[in-house]
Image (cartoon, rainbow, N blue to C red):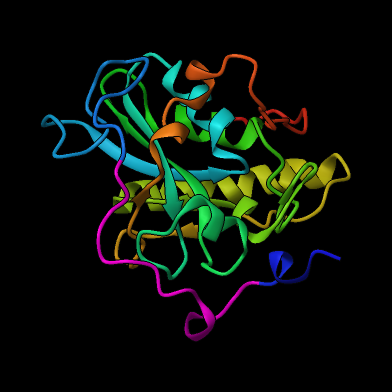
Amino acid sequence: MFGLKTQMISKDQALTGRPDPLPTDDIHAVLGTPIKGPFPEGLETVVVAMGCFWGVERLFWKQDGVYSTAAGYIGGYTPNPTYKEVCSGQTGHTEGVQIVYDPAKISFNQLLKLFWEEHNPTQGFRQGNDVGTQYRSAIFARTDAQYQAALASKDAFEHDLKARGLGEITTEIYGPDEDTPFYYAEDYHQGYLEKNPGGYCGLKGTGVVCAI
């Protein structure tokens, strides 16, 4: 029924993309901070995918200690893809949100707790009614400490999910040494739910608490 949208494409089948980044905002619509680096010293960055990136970005920009967020594409093969290309299932990318945060104000474990609790990480190539490889769950760690913490939290949370009758976690977790560039999405996706307060938000957790 959904064709390519539920089949992960191979690198040699992916769209070719383009060499230049898409034009996009430079300043965060809510926080007033830059959405592109370099960022101030002492801040850390991580990228997460939890389904449609509109609601995910809003979830994290609301957190004290988060300096900036941005919507984009990550985890696939096509350089600088468009939203239409990503939705076709022919880029391999997820809809991701880049989070820039101050670890002195909000810990990575606090971000992980939000990540696990605010979506369903057991659904594979979908999130609720949103179906496609771009909606898969993923964490793209940018430091080894983030990577190890993400792996440990996955194992612990999966145990709790199974105790509640849910399946195995399908979340992909990438380490800092893997080649996972983040491509910024088009202007209208940045801060989308600030610009469109009545817009769609597909976030829905399982009700299971992540004990971090």
Residue 212 makes an appearance in the image: no
Q: Quadrant of residue 157?
A: top right
Q: On the picture, is 134 further left or further right than 64?
A: right
Identify whether 127 is placed above or below 172.
Answer: above
Identify whether 190 is placed above or below 22.
Answer: above
Q: Residue at x 41, y 75 (%)?
A: 16
Question: Which quarter of the image is occupied by the C terminus?
Answer: top right
Segment colored magenta? 8-23
Residue 26 makes an appearance in the image: yes
Q: Residue at x 53, y 82 (%)?
A: 13
Question: Which quarter of the image is occupied by the N terminus?
Answer: bottom right
Q: Position of residue 124 (x, y in %)?
A: 71, 58
Q: Nearer the viewer, residue 46 or 9?
A: 9
Q: Position of residue 76 (x, y in %)?
A: 47, 66
Residue occupying the far left of the picture: 41
Q: Residue at x 42, y 68 (%)?
A: 78
Q: Position of residue 111 (x, y in %)?
A: 46, 30
Secondary structure mostly seen in the magenta stretch: loop
Residue 125: in magenta span: no
Residue occupying the far bottom of the picture: 12
Q: Quadrant of residue 106?
A: top left
Residue 20: in magenta span: yes
Identify whether 38 is placed above or below 195.
Answer: below
